[in-house]
Image (spheres, rainbow, N blue to C red):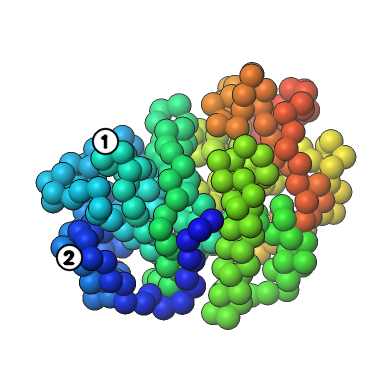
Amino acid sequence: MDYTVTIDALPTLSFGRKVAIVTNPKVAGLHLAYVMARIQAKELYVITVPDGESYKTLSTIETILENCFEHRLDRKSLLIGLGGGVIGDMTGFAASLFQRGIDFVQIPTTLLAQVDASVGGKTGINNRFGKNLIGAFHQPKAVYIDPSFLTTLPAREYQAGIAEIIKMAVTFDSAFFAWLEKANLRDKSDIAYAIEQSVRIKARVVAMDEKEQGIRAALNYGHTFGHVIEHEAGYGHYLHGEAVAIGMVMANALAVRLGLMQAQEAARVEKLLKHYDLPTHFAIADVEHFYDLFFMDKKSANDAITFILPKGIGDVALRNDIPKVDVVAVLAAQGA
């Protein structure tokens, strides 16, 4: 990654070009004035789109692009994503499309976006076939993580972000996981350290594999199951981090079944998720239907499903050779 990730109070940002901030009404009401007071630009516009995962669609992207044209933005202009992961993903995707690609900056306002979604250049939208199946790799020019935004987050949103922090630790850093077991992530200093460590892990992995041809896919631990859960429950029923938490527990169960992870390690992960009031169970009504939806996952290829499974705590394996019988057994254990 060749851009800066700043973790501190938002500095004054000066741009000698046209800038448009993409946000939603909820975030705008809380933070837009604070951010606009810190931006100097040739011209500054605000593009407001509806709030929520259900609006992460091509229709919303068209709305953003139409606004860009109406404000007469050009190839030298800049978009700023001010919001959570949904806003960040859509802003980046719109920036990748407008006049074949313009610059954008991320100012994430949720914990989930600060520790994961804002870093790495993944952009995209959902459709009826699944989550983030339409998109592009388009790296931001900078990411500004201001922890003060977290003071306005509802508890549920905050907890959803913690799931992504736990994900980073389980897959790449056993010492960080052990620290998390003792930390209080509702404490200002502890969460600041956790954000820093999560961004460090994410940046290191992205630098090794920007286009997700290998190790970067490991960052999707919990997501293969989680994306299907979001689809089946209906987008918006679970927050993304909540679905990932359940997905991590399912992935751990599969890893234990295959001998990659000890049951006591899986229990440690589940205990930590529950400590932050994250869901860990999803009742699967139709196991065969759930299994078939795995094939819509972006990591799947040649009719083989790629699963990201922990090898204990602190290591990870990408497997596309797991017999259906093993996966179905784990899904069936969830019960209806």
Residue lying at 54% horizontally and 26% vertically, measured from the top left = 296
- First along the sequence among labels 2 and 1: 2
Residue lying at 25% horizontally and 53% vertically, measured from the top left = 76
Rounded to the nearest angstrom, the CA distance separating label 2 from label 1 is 29 Å
Q: Which of 224 and 281 is in front in this view?
A: 224
Amino acid bearing label 1: Ser
Vertical side of 204 occupied by 251: above or below? above
Tag count: 2
The residue singled out by tag 1 in the image is 59
The spot of residue 172 in percent (x, y) is 72, 56
Quarter of the image with the N terminus is bottom right
- Image check: 38 left or right of 220? left
Q: Quadrant of residue 31?
A: bottom left
Vertical side of 161 occupied by 242: above or below? above
Question: Mark 2: which secondary structure?
Answer: strand
The label number, if any, that marks residue 37 in the structure image? none
- Image check: 124 left or right of 36? right
- Image check: 11 left or right of 175? left
The spot of residue 210 in percent (x, y) is 56, 46
Q: In which quarter of the image is residue 323?
A: top right
Question: Mark 1: which secondary structure?
Answer: helix
Q: Can residue 176 be seen by looking at this rendering?
A: yes
The spot of residue 309 in percent (x, y) is 74, 42
Residue lying at 20% horizontally and 48% vertically, measured from the top left = 74
Vertical side of 323 occupied by 157: above or below? below
The label number, if any, that marks residue 42 in the structure image? 2
Q: Nearer the viewer, residue 75 or 11?
A: 75
- Image check: 226 left or right of 85? right
Q: Quadrant of residue 128?
A: top left
The spot of residue 115 in percent (x, y) is 54, 61
Camera-side mark, 2 or 1: 2
Residue lying at 85% horizontally and 54% vertically, measured from the top left = 264
